[in-house]
Image (cartoon, rainbow, N blue to C red):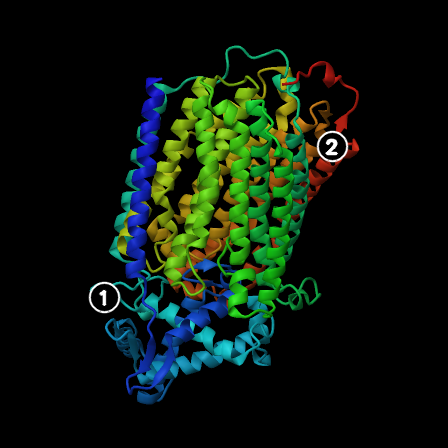
Amino acid sequence: MKRTKKLWIAFALVVGLSFAVLIYYGVKIYQQAPPIPERVEVENGKVLFTGTDISDGQNVWQSIGGQEVGSVWGHGAYVAPDWTADWLHREALFILNYWSEKEDGVSYDKLNPERQSALQTRLQKELRKNTYNADTKTLTISPLRALAFDHLRNYYSSLFSDDPAFNKLRDAYAIPKETIKDPERLRQINTFFFWASWACVTERPGENVSYTHNWPSDKLIGNVATGDLMLWTGFSVIMLLFGIGVLVFYNAQHQEDEISDEIPQDDPLLSITSTPSMRATLKYFWIVTALILLQVILGVVTAHFGVEGGGFYGIPLDQIMPYSLSRTWHVQLAIFWIATSWLATGLYIAPAVSGYEPKYQKLGVNFLFIALLIIVAGSMVGQWMAIMQKLGFAENFWIGHQGYEYVDLGRFWQIFLFIGLFLWLGLMVRALWPALIQKGNSRNLLIMFIISSVAIAMFYGAGLMWGKRSNLAVAEYWRWWVVHLWVEGFFEVFATVVAAFLFVRMKLLNEKSATLNVLFSTIIFLSGGIIGTFHHLYFSGTPTGVLALGSTFSALEVVPLVIIGTEAYHNYRISRVKPWVSAYKWPIYCLIAVAFWNFLGAGIFGFIINPPIALYYMQGLNTTPLHGHTALFGVYGILGIGLMLFVLKGLYRQNVWKDSLISFSFWSINIGLFLMAILSLLPIGLLQTIASVNEGMWYARSAEFMQQPLMNTLRWMRVIGDTIFAFGTIGLALFVIGLKTGWSYEKGNFDVEKTRKTY
């Protein structure tokens, strides 16, 4: 009891202090974000464009897919360029060539190294000097830079319209003709690109680094890695080693065997009667299975756009579903089906834990199901209308495409989902309440279950904190609250508690030690995880303190993964303690796979890109989807599948499952994901990193580099892993269907009614 109290105090301190730091620097980000000028003027007083144009341009960018078509500040998709890196390098070359041809009579690349160096120094003074006047809110640029803007405006307008001279480049970037149809919108998006690029090279007042801490790397414009990046990278490694040492020492002192000393001879869950609301969750898992298949199909299409930007094996698919749309749906459906699986598992477990079925609980479960279907379908239709340029700015913001990766859906659908999550929370609490008010060893576990459920509902609300015209730095701050804290944070806590609950209900785990371990695991995870949110924001227009804290605490996120093998072995032992436990073999194997992907995808592949000096060169390269695929699907996706299989086992408890189909599915999904990462994403990402270090981010993302024969070959190599993975998901769908039709289980093994008891 004393140790439990100490852990609760530690939990409260970690959460309280961490969020205090997160909010404090959130205020700093609001105050120190790259300013959006009211006017951008040439030195002669001519107004080139206004702040309204920049905000409208940001809305245009969002309407075509935003971070789903190329990236800005390194965040987004990977086929098209990072527009800020691309703009800056093209602007630099234009200015250098202008000076060279005017003063030396030849192009810049024909000059001797000494003359080139002199012009580079002059260029950096031109670009890096901050000429924004905070009093008048006016940004003043030279006539030459205004000339460069006109040149680049023509270039990008041609790229995003239908200029036939850009057909090959559009194909390389997977951008369809007439992505933007309105000439005024073409003008506006260029003003946004100018502002976002200006923030990347212009030095902060009183500092010698740009607003984005000199990202992207480009020696030509003076964007080089700073000493701060090296310092905090070294400090993060020290913190990692320190955290590992403390964790290993604590674990050795307090390690307890969670496995129960009195494991029953028969499955305790067989004696539990499924309530109407528990049975009503079955339809959720049918939809989960359908969404997995649809998401994988869209993933195949999205990956193929990388090698055939204009279509799919000759079919001009980009005319009705361009890359930006297929990627939007692919990413969004992953969040939808994973979240749906976890939410449905909670709705199933709540009455099972308390033994209480509240009045109208089934009605609430069914109503929530219909609401989720409307959100999925409605948001997808809205995104199609947005990307096909059928919506105005206001309509796009509310029902179309917000342009921010993982939270692309329009604001109306966000609010709808937010309300739905609170409906889910209400259903959970009312079902758990009788168990919560009873005193017992499981009460602490129930409280943590409720806390994680409340956090899931509340923290999605961070996605409502930016507006249609919010500064990009501010929007990025809140977006990562959703992506990191909601998806990677409190869902992880929820899953940990759910897994413990399942094993405790099966009487496989000692209730007291399971509770202590859940509390300790949560404290360790959130110690690095909350402030570790900042590692996504190193180069997003944030102050240096974000870099220091993000690098330090994101290193601590890796600490728990050093004992992940213990967790995997622990779950393996559970699967073999009694013959009846073998009925839960595949859900438990999913937990073992989650431990593996936690170590490889979240741990190794995550830490590859987390240190500041690494991310400086890697942000926006294929090392990010390497981490994203192996962590999002490998950890959260396979965990979602495992939870689904646990619930399906409970709903079809009278059946003994056949191993062949689910075994094929399990191994195909995991092997396919591994091959996808190792054969394609990892080598492409590493080659891009070398290019980024040697030449600059602009080159690592350019068509010149990405369309080389070797890079095309490596992209085609994804077919091997993708195909195996796709067959695995088809096998999973057939297995789930077979639980209804009968081909997935042996019939007539025992009469479950004889072993049931009712509440």
Which of the pair 387/319 is nearer the observer? 387
Q: Is residue 532 left or right of residue 346?
A: left
Residue 573 falls in image quadrant: top right
Q: In the rendering, at what x and y percent does residue 644 appear?
A: 62, 34
Left or right of 709, for residue 744: right
Answer whether residue 223 is visible to the viewer in this image: yes
Position of 498 relative to 338 (above/below): above
Q: Which quadrant is the C terminus positioned in?
A: top right
SS for dot 1 = loop
Q: Which residue is mark 2?
A: 739
Dots 1, 2 in contact, CB < 8 A: no
> Residue at coordinates 60% horizontally, 15% vertically from top-left?
578
Q: Nearer the viewer, residue 97 or 489?
A: 489
Which type of secondary structure does the marked residue at label 2 adopt? helix
Residue 687 rendering spot, x and y as whole percentages = 47, 56
Look at 32% across and 47% down and name the residue there.
22
When asked about the image quadrant of residue 221, the answer is bottom left
Badge 2 amino acid: Leu
N-terminal-most mark, 1 or 2: 1
* Residue 180 figure quarter: bottom right
Whole-percent x, y for residue 199 in the image? 34, 67
> Which of these two is toward me, 390 or 231?
390
Given the current orientation, which residue lies at the most extreme left position?
206
Image coordinates of residue 682 in percent, x first then y, are 50, 50
Q: Residues within 10 Å of mark 2 (few under 14, many from 20)?
A: some
Question: Which amino acid type is shown beneath numbered disc 1?
Answer: Pro
Please state, as top left, top right, bottom left or bottom right, where the N terminus lies in the image.
Answer: top left
599 shown above or below 9: below
Residue at the spot x=50%, y=54% of the render?
407
The residue at which mark 1 appears reads as 205
